[in-house]
Amino acid sequence: MSETIIEIENLYKMYRLGVIGTGSFKQDLQRWWTANVLRKEDPFFQITQGNKQDTSPETIVALQNINLKVKHGETIGIIGKNGSGKSTLLKIISRIVRPTHGTVRGKGKISSLLEVGTGFHQELTGRENIYISGYILGMSKHDIQRKFDEIIAFSGVEQFIDTPVKRYSSGMYVRLAFAVAAHLEPDILIVDEVLAVGDADFQKKCLGKMREVSQAESRTILFVSHSMQAIKNLCDKAVWLHQGQMQAFGPSAAIVNKYLTSTQDAHLLQVWHTQDEAPGNDLVRIRSVELEPQLASPDAPLDIRTPLTVRVQFWNMQEETVLNIGLHLFTASGECVFDLPSPAVTCAKGLVEGECTIPGNFLNDGSYYVSIIIVRDTSISLYYHEECLRFELEDYRENIQWYGKWWGAVRPQFPIQLKQAMLSIPQDSI
């Protein structure tokens, strides 16, 4: 069995809003004496029984009761919404921030990519900043010299290496900063949102370097990202944090599915049982609209592979009239993806229903809403029910190592082929 390289026990972190220290010199002195000389619990933040905090309105709990063990060579993804405590946890493990309560034990050298570019001086050249940043991140002069050419090649700024970094574009600046940090040789690599900046080529290099570190060099990685595909493909396990608490820990695919299912903003059904309360007019009234995802399993999230069936029922208050419905699909920003009309049908007075299935592997990931229009004689609008359904599709990629945003509103799987072409050379040219 692999040895435990990071162990976190009963970890809490609290902050007092708007105050540096306790707000009182006497309390600051008492706190320092108790924690550093007497080696007792911090007297300012008290943890009560039952693993709950005795907090005031001025106190915010960033992390509470975190317990985690990481084995040597594992790649652990950390996921959660903004403000869930991900970066705070990494800073505590990196020994940048002290915990309020609890312990963190680790073995080996830690390298943290939390703030890419820390230590860069705007007036110095890229070459000079490589040495300064390397020193700050724990590299010796010999290590920097040995890896200097590799760092420059990785950054892609060879032509400007002797130019002051204040003249670099933001992309060049980040490339050089990440190149320095990525070529450390730590036992534990901590990475926070490296995929949030840079172009597709930069992201590919970042992910490739992380894969090399985790697989070829068998080092431990803690990786924070909002790219769920990157988490599933790069990480063995995942930790889900929510409002400072650990919701789940386990295999990355299962934890990501749980997280996505819980966060998807969906409004999939509206039903009105009587005509009096139903939306519409004297001609037609909506009874129900529903979007039913055809999920592979009950706990699977909605993603681009999921077929979506839209059903609508409405009361027709007219005798023998020609009706059809239109399904309008919009992105969250209001751009129309498609306007799909049904065939026109002669309908008697009473309940009318329609159904349409949007196939899987057609829409791109993102948020969408559906509007329904009821039309008479294929030209006269009777009623338009706006934004009656709302759903969100997550990304899914198989055998693709790039995790940037996929272009387009749709993402169909049309047949496309690639094959090796045979080049024939005329005999008289030889």
Image (cartoon, rainbow, N blue to C red):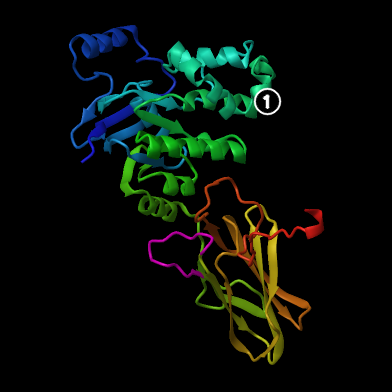
Describe residue 387's horizontal placement relative to residue 136 as left or right. Answer: right
Magenta region includes residue 314? no
Look at 54% across and 16% down and name the residue there.
130
* Residue 410 on image: x %, y %: 64, 60
Which quadrant holds residue 240? Answer: top left
Residue positioned 53% across, 26% down in the render: 179
Could you tell me which quadrant the N terminus lies in? top left
| Coordinates of residue 69 in the picture (x, y in percent) | 25, 37
Residue 298 shown in magenta: yes
**Rendered residue at 28%/35% (across/down):** 72
Whether 219 is drawn above or below 229: the answer is above
Q: Residue at x 52, y 73 (%)?
A: 272
Q: Give SS at disc 1.
A: loop
The amino acid type of the residue labelled 1 equals Ser
Residue 300 in percent (x, y) is at: 41, 61
Q: Which residue is mark 1?
A: 169
Residues drawn in magenta: 292-305
